[in-house]
Image (cartoon, rainbow, N blue to C red):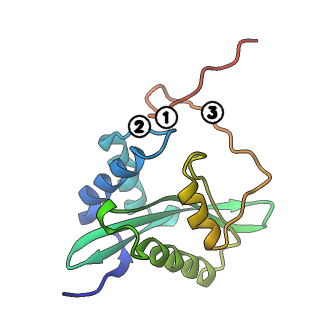
Amino acid sequence: MDGPRIEQATIEDLPHLTELLTELFTLEGDFVPDSTRQMRGLRMLLEQPSRGRIFVLKQNGMILGMLNLLFTISTAEGGSVIILEDLIIRADYRGHGLGSRLLDYALDYARKKDFKRITLLTDRLNAEAQRFYKRHGFFESAMLPMRYVLSADAGTHAPERPRV
């Protein structure tokens, strides 16, 4: 039995990555799992590596977890930055340091590629995830995340807009 190893995801991993995102989005308040959407987004990342990376943690051919990074440019930082979009470890493998291992790998990747910052969002009610990221050096920003939903099929729980 091999130990878990981290590698870049491939198109062959797509069905398993989609399953993991379904698991993740059942835990988050803002999102609704939709395998068609999740598969479409993952495929876009896998087919356009200039837009980001998906890393998987595998053991004996089975994906135990995943993390995806989206690349963009920050005018404030004057360089390339990352949005850490998704990090999930299969429920039955949590609590063994695998999430930390995957996140540490991503942080090392970002340093080696000279990215300036990594930003992420966590669910406000998920104190465990917040503690996890803080243990790895992330901190709360003074910025307030906001979103505007452009598509009726966006799959997010958009609050009712205030009446003017």
Q: Earlier in the sequence, mark 2 or mark 3?
A: 2
Which residue is denoted by mark 3 in the rendering? 148
SS at circle 2: loop
Q: Earlier in the sequence, mark 1 or mark 2?
A: 2
- Expressed as whole percent of the image width and height from the top left, the position of residue 12 reads 23, 65
SS at circle 1: loop
Report the residue that reaches farthest toward the bottom.
Answer: 2
- Which residue type carries mark 3? Tyr
Q: Residue at x 51, y 73 (%)?
A: 103
- Taking 119 as reference, is 129 left or right? left
* Residue 44: quarter of image: bottom left
- Taking 70 as reference, is 164 left or right? right
CB under 8 Å between discs 1 and 2: yes
Q: Residue at x 26, y 59 (%)?
A: 16
In the image, which disc is placed on residue 156? 1
- Viewer-proximal residue, 155 or 137? 137
SS at circle 3: loop
Few, some or many C-alpha atoms within 10 Å of disc 1 (few <14, some 14-19, many ≥20)?
A: some
Quadrant of image for the C terminus: top right
When the figure is inspected, residue 25 is found, relative to residue 51, above or below; the finding is: above
